[in-house]
Image (cartoon, rainbow, N blue to C red):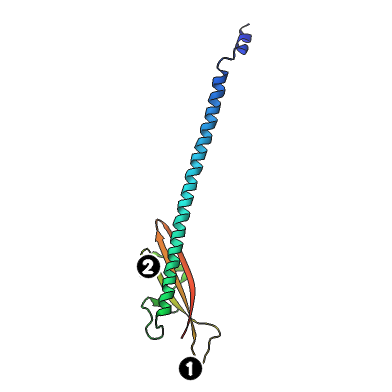
Amino acid sequence: MGKKTIRKNQNGSVLVLGMMMLVLLSLLGIAVVTTSTIEVQIAANDRLYKENLYDSEAATMEGAQTLQNADLKNAPPAWLMGIGAINEANDMFSDVFWNNTVQSANVPEARLAAAFQGYAPGSSLDLGRSRVHLYSIYGRCQRNNGAAIVRVGYRKAF
């Protein structure tokens, strides 16, 4: 008789079921909060990357504008480097290289560099005509443990 009374007595079964539901809802809440936190971090990193990218691009465009306005034949900017002065494989990721470049006037966190790459293929060999000169312009912005580097090609005939 003692076993039958235990089976028929279902007092507290709702409590056990309620506790199981509470545990499941708590786990679901923890998962949602964790996912939301990670998504906020991803969005912050994406914003930082885009800010660095756009500021790097602004520095390169500033460099291109400076080269456009400069008399490259007679008085090139002091920060314009010669052929082979920039090794992309090593210099682009070296803080020492970027510390020796010029700071952007428009974006304080950005730096820029440029190098003469030679003459454009097919440009005239006639000394009386203009030749097309090739340049590479680099911009870098680094802030909050994030960095972006932009390289653009530039051509100018003189």
Q: Residue at 44% x, 76% y: name it.
A: 115
SS at circle 2 = loop
Rendering coords of residue 143 (x, y %): 39, 59
Crowd class of label 2 (few under 14; some 14 to 19; many from 20; radius 10 Å): few
Rendering coords of residue 30 (x, y %): 50, 36
Q: Give 105 or 119, whichever is nearer the viewer.
A: 105
* Residue 151, above or below 126: above
Q: Residue tagged by mark 2? A: 106
Q: Name which quarter of the figure residue 72 lies in.
A: bottom left
Report the amino acid beneath label 2. Answer: Asn
Q: Residue tagged by mark 1? A: 128
Rendering coords of residue 131 (x, y %): 49, 86
Alpha carbon separation for disc pair 1 and 2: 38 Å
Q: Residue at 41% x, 71% y: name it.
A: 62
Camera-side mark, 1 or 2 = 2
Please say whether residue 12 is visible from this viewpoint: yes
